Amino acid sequence: MGRGRQKAKHTKVARELKYFSPDTNYNALERELTGHPANDPRLDEDLAKWPEYEAGKDADTDDADADADDQYVDHYATEDEQKRA
């Protein structure tokens, strides 16, 4: 394919991509943004392999906040430094 034909083809493809507007599936977008998990067989398969992640899937936010606080504990600090923190 010559350079002129190649450039014309790329221009045509770029123009199609620029002006292409697919129909938006607002229901799928809402599910994705709200975090409601869809019935995904791959997710179910992965959760079957690693059950420790499934326990955290339905955890309350209070438990998640407690876990988040624990990750910032300085395990190398002395007892006095830990009490001040």
Image: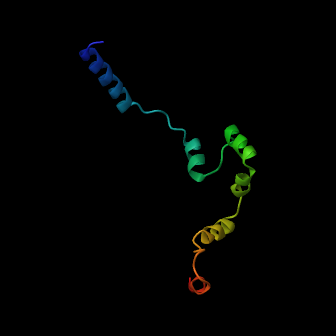
Looking at this view, name the residue that lies furthest to the top. Answer: 1
Q: In this rendering, would 63 be left or right of 34?
A: right
Which of the pair 79/67 is nearer the observer?
Answer: 79
Q: In this rendering, would 71 be left or right of 57?
A: left
Which residue is found at the position 60% from the left and 47% from the top?
31
Which quadrant of the rendered structure holds the N terminus?
top left
11, above or below 60, in the image: above
Which of the pair 18/47 is nearer the observer?
Answer: 47
How many numbered discs sit on the rendered protein? Answer: 0
Which residue is found at the position 30% from the left and 24% from the top?
11
Q: In this rendering, would 36 be left or right of 33?
A: right
Which residue is found at the position 65% from the left and 47% from the top?
37
Residue 73 image offset from top left, x and y in percent: 59, 74
36, above or below 65, in the image: above
Q: In this rendering, would 10 be left or right of 70?
A: left
Residue 39 image offset from top left, x and y in percent: 69, 41
Residue 22 image offset from top left, x and y in percent: 47, 32
Which quadrant of the rendered structure holds the C terminus?
bottom right
Q: Please identify the quarter of the rendering in which residue 13 is found.
A: top left
Residue 19 image offset from top left, x and y in percent: 36, 31
Which of the pair 15/10 is nearer the observer?
Answer: 10
Q: Please identify the quarter of the rendering in which residue 49 is found.
A: top right
Looking at this view, name the residue that lies furthest to the left. Answer: 4
The colour style of the image is: rainbow
